[in-house]
Amino acid sequence: MSAALNTKICEMFGVKYPVIQTAMGWVSTPELTAATANAGGMGFLAAATIKPEEVGKEIQRVRALTDKPFGVNFLMEAPGADIIVDSILEHGVRAASYSRSPNPEFIKRFKDAGVLCVPTVGAPRHAEKAVQLGADIIVCQGGEGGGHTGTIASTILLPAVLDMVDVPVVAAGGFKDGRGLVAALAYGASGIAMGTRFLLTKESPVPPATAERYLKANVKNNAEQIKVTTQVDGMPQRCVVNELVHELENASTVGLLWQSFKSAMEYRKLSGAGMFEILNSALQMRKSNGLTLSQTLMGANALAMVKAAMIDGDPIHGVLPSGVVAGLIDDLPSVDELIQSIMREAEERLAALSV
């Protein structure tokens, strides 16, 4: 393998390749996380959609499937976050990733235990703050990324963040192959992180009907099939446009609030959290992220609506978070096939550049 592909994050994580599988709620299961680790990448288990008291068991499931390093992603402001932190530390997980509302106390506990802190940011000022709080590696997600996303394109955000921080930076938002990896390295990044590309693999738990809806979102035919909406949970979220998105974007304020109430009840069942905990978490998120009251009330929508598509197999009435890169994906390789193809293509691009 070319020396250029053996980057700083490979050494820090203890992995073979500078490729990260991001944590997607309901999708980044122990099976997908372990498959990434076994293929030489860095996988992250999504704990946001696991009851806090069951996260330790899910970490053990990953351990049973791989002896390679992996990480856990969670919401630091969510009910039961302290239980998840305890599980990460107890089981010696290599890295913890997070985005909104970083908790200095949790970060200190990770740092003291040697757990790598890997926040995701969508703006340069967030990267600077993350490093001040103790980030070891920054995942820099441009607006092309799926799910909650910012407005700054990867090609603008990446160099801006690289110029601001002195820790390794990983590029995310619009990456799917070896060409993208080499492009990110040329900017100065230490690797790439991908969500949508891993969502469309054989080890992904996404039901066939839902995967098919992603594969049909071809930007060559219709560039508006994947766009950003604020009507899911009040914050900008990039997703595949479907019947539900059309319905939400035409709903009244009362209709959206009623949907939020139903989602909150669903989230309560899924998380095991009480209403007081949910409300307290929402208020913390509102304070730390500057959300409006309506955005705060809509906050429960995303997890419940994504579950409909990712678990129940209903791509019509569920949300389909997606990066724009889905518009260029037309296959479902295994995780190992995907990572090997990325590294092979990266080698080819590097060789072509040196001619």
Image: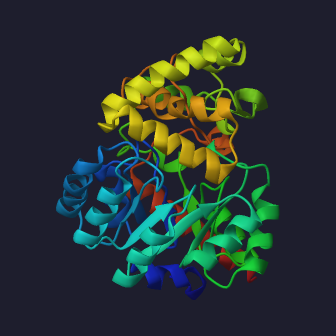
Q: Is residue 125 above or below residue 132?
A: above
Task: Please tell me which residue is depicted at 69% across the width and 65% down the height of the picture.
Answer: 126
Front in this rendered view, residue 69 or 343: 69
Percent from the top left, x then y, of residue 73?
A: 43, 57
Which of the 4 quarters of the picture holds residue 2? bottom right
Q: Is residue 63 above or below residue 152?
A: below
Left or right? Give the position of 58 relative to 193: left
Task: Please tell me which residue is depicted at 24% across the width and 65% down the height of the picture.
Answer: 66
Can residue 16 be seen at all in this image of the molecule?
no
Front in this rendered view, residue 226 or 328: 226
Can residue 353 be seen at all in this image of the molecule?
yes
Percent from the top left, x then y, of residue 199?
A: 47, 44
Front in this rendered view, residue 185 or 298: 298
Q: Residue furthest bottom?
A: 3
Percent from the top left, x then y, of residue 112?
A: 38, 83
Q: Is residue 213 above or below residue 45?
A: above
- The colour style of the image is rainbow
Task: Give the tally of numbered discs.
Answer: 0
Task: Please tell me which residue is depicted at 21% across the width and 63% down the height of the picture.
Answer: 63
Front in this rendered view, residue 275 or 210: 275
Percent from the top left, x then y, of residue 84?
A: 32, 58
Task: Please tell me which residue is depicted at 31% across the width and 29% down the height of the picture.
Answer: 269
Which of the 4 quarters of the picture holds residue 160? bottom right
Quadrant placement of the C terminus? bottom right
Q: Is residue 194 above or below residue 305?
A: below
